[in-house]
Amino acid sequence: MKFVDEMTIQVSSGNGGNGVIAFRREKFVPLGGPSGGDGGRGGDLIFEATDDLTTLYELSFVRIYKAENGEHGRPRDMIGANGKNLIIKVPVGTLVYAHESGQLLCDLDHKGQQVIIAHGGRGGFGNARFVSAVRRTPRIAEKGEPGKTLNLRLELKLLADVGLVGLPNAGKSTFLRAVSNARPKVADYPFTTLHPSLGIVKPEGLPSFCMADIPGLIEGAHGGAGLGTQFLKHIERTRVLLHLVDVSQLDMENITGNYDVIMSELREFSEELAEKPVIVAANKMDLPDSRELFPEFKDELEKRGVKVFAVSGATHEGVDDLLKYVCQQLKELREPIQIAGNEDEKLYEYLEAYHIEMVSEGQWQVTGPEIERLVAMTDFTSDEAIAIFRRKLKKLGFIDDLAELEAGDDDVFSIGEMEFAYREFFI
């Protein structure tokens, strides 16, 4: 399966069903009252985190998602059925952003977590709802509220306890195969690993933990060299960095050069990454050159306060001691700070009921959730509905604000999908 960790999609909640105009037609009841039922509510658009997926690949085949619309109301006071919610399942660790603004909408960081990204539209009222002491036979019904459409960017950041980093051919894939259930491709050339691999490590007699092999790190990775910018983000959630260094390839003039390259790239990408606890595994100790160079390499890093272990992914030399130390470090560390989504907040916060702006000479744009909803749900073929629409605009204060504008009678005001001449508001 192809590894996909970032994509854009469009999602829409369901439209509310329309209310209906109807009257009772019963035997011996010649003047039956209104009986138009309300429309059903549109379905919500929901994201759910699941362990069954490890990549966004399966979502890449469909880029537009829409929840079910609510059904229209019916005579005899029958309410339309609500639309079914649409649940989109994504891997644990998925972040959902508003594509245009870049605002983080939610962080799906644990299995089973559900977040409503877009609520379904409210069903319109049928004419039975508009009965009053002075309006006994209303011929008015609301349209259903339109659902919300959002363009989203999904980004997957793997959730792992330990991030395995190092230059290409440092032996990361071989090491991950040796200590976990992961089976990454292994070969003797750079960039064998083209996507992150996750493995569960189960040391004997110790708690298990998750390890991620992060590929693509070379000098200049933070600026886009190699595959760096694609995968550096996956280290951000890890608690400990396990840095594998191929000791057999060390430069005697700069014994810590390979180590410094990776640490410099992490620091350039994010200061938080560079501050994570680092454990160094001097790898390929089964080779003669490694044994010769290891003592000097270890001395140099320990002077900096870095813990160094001599290991071999091929022969398992030193692996048990390393894993015990990793488990000890994980136990002592606090839980990682998770990115906080705004699950309990509205996706967008509006500070005013509406906003009026001149876009060109004689052309005005009116925006705002409340006034756009009012326009969308009004049936402009009904004189009664139009009268109620004007009364609601006046209650909002919109008519008073219009009167203060320097607008001509033929100026056009766009609200949602409707256009109105200035004079129409004052008839």
Image: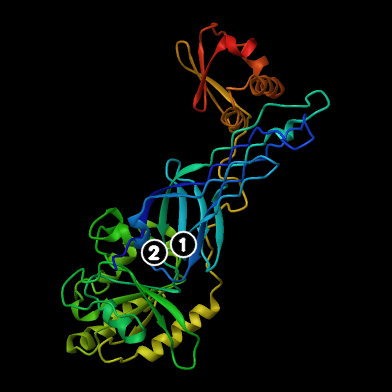
Quadrant for the N terminus in the image:
bottom left
Give coordinates of residue 144: x percent, y percent. 59, 37
Is residue 248 in view from this perspective? yes
- Looking at this view, is 75 or 143 the one in front? 75
- Residue 199: name its quadrant: bottom left
For mark 2, give the secondary structure: helix
- Residue 288: name its quadrant: bottom left
For mark 1, give the secondary structure: strand
Q: Is 283 left, or right, of 71 in this rendering?
A: left
User: What amino acid does circle 1 point to?
Assistant: Lys
The residue that label 1 is drawn on is 89
Extreme residue toward the left, this view? 189
Mark in front: 1 vs 2: 1
Q: Please tell me which residue is depicted at 38% across the width and 60% down the height of the picture.
A: 233
User: What amino acid does circle 2 point to?
Assistant: His
- Looking at this view, is 79 or 344 the one in front? 79
Q: Is 289 left, or right, of 345 in this rendering?
A: left
Give coordinates of residue 100: x percent, y percent. 43, 41
Marks 1/2: CA–CA distance: 20 Å
The residue that label 2 is drawn on is 234
Q: How many marks?
A: 2
Give coordinates of residue 334: x percent, y percent. 56, 72
